[in-house]
Amino acid sequence: MAPRRKDSLLNGIDMQHAGKPTGNGHNPEPPINPLYQRACFITAAARVDRMPPDQGREVAFAGRSNAGKSSAINTICHRRQLARTSKTPGRTQQVVFFALDETRRLVDLPGYGYAKVSEAVKLQWQRLMASYLQQRRSLAGLVVVMDIRHPLTVFDRRMLEWGRRAELELLLLLTKSDKLKRGAARAERERVAKAVTADGRRIRVELFSAQTRSGTEPVHGVLDRWLGVGG
Ligand code: GDP
């Protein structure tokens, strides 16, 4: 199994810059997609060689701690407690795998951005992320979840850069969009989309809210494509 781009994924990430959270909301009820609703926990692994067999397809979710990643995964799967919404900084340094069916998985990557964790934990996190993103052949795409009020932190940018270098499909999810008025949320989406355009290549940016569930449908559309659902 030839690893993807061994070179510089480990370069210079530090976990010094922490972030902020919170919640509230509004409207539409998307149709239930049974594939995502069937998601079930497989395993959590802190090492690439402890992960499930690298077969089929999976989509990974990354995000700064408290960005709303767990809530987004739960909303996408129409489940309350699938991914645990964590209150404890750096609680887990594990990659968590959820099966959708026999060949498709969703993957919850450990949150980044806590200032208080030790150097050893930071380094462990970097190594785990870098080796996962580089080596995982079944990884079809990376969703980077960002709080719409604090997008594109240094971590988010690095995660995107790692994703680009690993030649992954990318989706930026601006979550907690219920925290902004509709016009302001749209403007923020445009601003972020422009900011992440590199070499004329646009990264798809979607508004999302776990509170109102808005944005679930377009996310399912992207995940369906990456996971090869329905043709
Ligand atoms: P994680 O650390 O990235 O997994 O973040 P969580 O999913 O645990 O969410 C962090 C906090 O933000 C929790 O208090 C959630 O209730 C809140 N939150 C998450 N998503 C939303 C959202 O879409 N809207 C609002 N208003 N709050 C949210």
Image (cartoon, grey):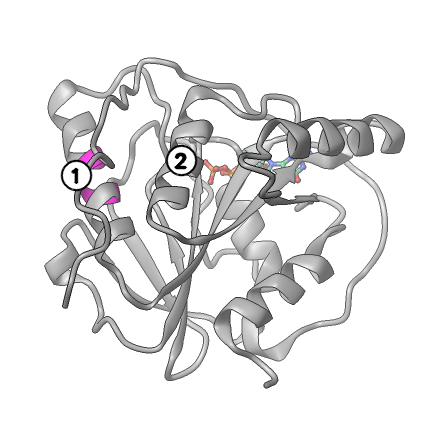
Left or right of 87 in this view: 199? right
Q: Earlier in the sequence, mark 2 or mark 1?
A: 1
In this image, 209 relative to 15: left or right? Answer: right
Q: Amino acid at mark 2?
A: Glu
Calculate the distance from the C-alpha at mark 2 to the C-alpha at mark 1. Answer: 15 Å
| Residue 128 painted magenta | yes
Residue at 24 percent of width and 21 percent of height: 12
- Span shown in magenta: 125-129
| Residue receiving disc 1 | 127
Residue at position x 34%, y 27% in the image: 89
Mark 2 vs 1: CB contact within 8 A:
no
Q: Position of residue 206 (x, y in %)?
A: 68, 45
**Residue 7: horizontal and vertical position, in percent?**
18, 39
The quadrant of the rendering that contains the N terminus is bottom left
Which amino acid type corresponds to the residue marked 1 in the rendered image? Arg
The foreground one among 131 and 199 is: 199
Q: Which residue is mark 2?
A: 161
Q: Is residue 80 above or below residue 224?
A: above
Residue drawn at x 25%, y 51% is 134
| Residue 199, above or below 49 | above
Mark 2: secondary structure? helix
At mark 1, the secondary structure is helix
The residue at the point 84 percent across, 42 percent down is 26
Q: Position of residue 213 (x, y in %)?
A: 72, 52
Which residue extends farthest right? 183
- In this view, the mark in front (2 or 1): 2
| Label 2 crowd (10 A; few <14 / some 14-19 / many >=20) | some
